Image: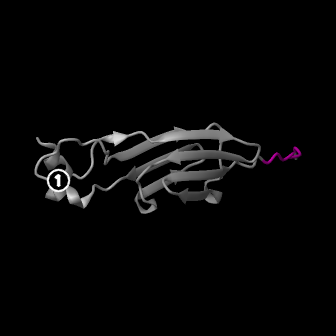
Amino acid sequence: MSIFYILEKEGIRENETPVLDLFVTEEFVVAVLELPGVSKENIKLSFSNEYLIVEAYKKNNPIYREAINFYVLEINYDRYYRKVSLPVRIEPEEVDINYDNGIVIIKMPREKIIYREVPIG
């Protein structure tokens, strides 16, 4: 199967793992994702108390349809997927996401632990 067929028919290749920095502060779990060339419309982020799931894809360039032969083909048009186990539980309803030029910054508030003393009745 030729690379032209793959790009034309499927438009993307196998899943790639996006690079990620993950750190914890007293208030937040922060993830910084690098997804170069991926528009924010093609990024899907899912959260639970314990996981962050990243799904994204980069569309191929329409000029490839005009190509007869490829001599060099180094630009990736991949589908990205990553499921990250978070180091502490978070509040998924309060997540803040910023996107700038292929960099996604996700601030996830740490779960508030409430201790309550209950008298024995």
* Residue at 16% in and 45% down: 70
- Nearest the camera: 4 or 23? 4
Give the percent coordinates (x, y) of residue 2: 12, 42
Three-letter code for the amino acid on which mark 1 is drawn: Lys
Q: Position of residue 38 (x, y in %)?
A: 41, 55
Picture quarter with the N terminus: top left
Q: Position of residue 14 (x, y in %)?
A: 29, 41
- The residue at the point 15 percent across, 58 percent down is 66
Q: Residues within 10 Å of mark 1 (few under 14, many from 20)?
A: few
Q: Does residue 64 appear left or right of residue 85 in this picture?
A: left
> Which color scheme does this rendered protein use?
one colour
Direction from residue 16 to residue 4 in the image, left or right: left
Q: Residues in magenta?
A: 114-120
Nearer-the-camera pick, 102 or 118: 102
Residue most extreme to the front = 71
**Tag count in the figure?**
1
Q: Is residue 106 above or below residue 85?
A: below
Q: Quick check: 38 left or right of 9?
A: right
Q: In the image, residue 87 lies at what x, y percent?
A: 63, 36
Residue at image point 64% right, 52% down: 107
Q: Residue at x 60, y 40 (%)?
A: 22
Along the horizontal axis of the image, is 116 left or right of 14?
right
Q: Is 64 or 15 nearer to us in this picture? A: 64
**Location of mark 1 (residue):** 9
Q: Secondary structure at mark 1?
A: helix
Q: Is residue 118 magenta?
A: yes
